[in-house]
Amino acid sequence: MHKTAEEVKQHHIDVMGEDLGSLYNALWNELAWLYSKWGEYVELFGTKPSRIDLINSAAGHFFRIVQDSLWEDSLLHIARLTDPPCTAGKKNLTINRLPDLLTDESLKNHIVPLIDKTLEKADFCRDWRNRHIAHKDLQLALKTGAEPLKPASRAQVEEVLASISDVLNALSNQYMKSTVMFEGMGGANGALSLLYVLDDGLRTEEERQVRHKAGDYRPSDYQARDV
C-alpha cells in the first residue's frame, strides 16, 4: 500500500524514536533526491557516446551548462550530507549527527566505521565545494601555483552514494528489518524522455533538409513557432 510522505516519516519515528526517526527520515529524503538527480546526470552524460553526440547536435552549449550544473550540485549535495554536525554554531543535516542519537552500543560500533569510510570517500567533494563551488579559490582561479582540486570522477561519486546508502541501510535493517535500493530512484518524464524528443526533432530536421535539397519546400517549414 502506498504511504504518504508524512506516513513514512511517522513510521520512522514510531520504530526509531522521535529524534533518530526524524533525522533518519530527513537523511533518507535527501539521499533519495540526490540519487534521482545523479541518475539524470548519468542518463544524459554517462551512459553511451551516442547520447553525447545527440545532445551536442541539439543544443551543445545549453547541455554543457546542464552537465556542469548537475555535476557540481551532486558534489555539493554530498558535501552537505557529510558535513560536521555543526558549522559556525548552526546545526547541519548530516550523517555525522547519527552516532550521538544511537543508544545501542553495538549498532553505534557498526555505524561509526561506515560513517568514517564515507567521510574518507567524500573528501574530494568537500575540496571541490570549499575551493571551487561554494567559494572560488583565487590562486586556483588564476592558475598561480595552487594545489589542484582533488581528482573527481563518476565512479567516485557512485562509491560515495553507495557508502551513504550503507549507513542508512544499517539503521533500516536494525529497526525495520529491510533495506532500500536507492539506485534507480527517479520519476517519469526525465532525461530519457527528453532524449527521445531530441532524437525525434533531429530526425525531422534531417528529413526537412533532404526535402529542401530535392526542391520540396512547404509553408510549415518557415512558419514562426511560439514555443
Image (tube, rainbow, N blue to C red):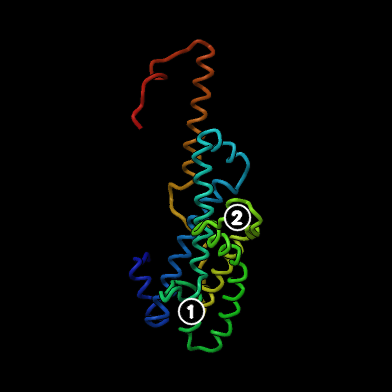
Residue 144 drawn at (x, y percent): 64, 53
Is 161 rendered above or below residue 217?
A: below
Residue name at image x 54 percent, y 76 percent: 170
Residue at the spot 48% in from the left edge and 12% down from the top edge: 216
| x and y, in percent, of residue 26 in the image | 41, 70
Left or right of residue 157, residue 224 in this image: left
Q: In which quarter of the image is the N terminus?
A: bottom left
Residue 151: tell me if it is visible.
Answer: no
Residue type pointed to by label 1 = Leu
Q: What residue type is labelled 2?
A: Leu
Could you tell me which quadrant the C terminus lies in?
top left
Q: Mark 1 — residue?
A: 98
Identify which residue is drawn at 45% across, 13% down.
217
Q: Nearer the viewer, mark 2 or mark 1?
A: 2
- Label 1 secondary element: loop
Q: Residues within 10 Å of mark 1 (few under 14, many from 20)?
A: many
Query: Label 2 crowding class (10 Å Cα cut-off): few <14, some 14-19, many 20+?
Result: some
- Residue 117 lies, in percent from the top left, at 62, 73
Q: Are marks 2 and 1 in contact (CB under 8 Å)?
A: no
Of the numbered discs 2 and 1, the one sitting upstream in the chain is 1
Is 174 or 110 nearer to us in this picture? 110
> What x and y, as percent, mark residue 178?
50, 74
Badge 2 marks a residue whose secondary structure is helix
Q: Say above or below: 102 vs 81.
A: below
From the image, tell me which residue sits under label 2.
140
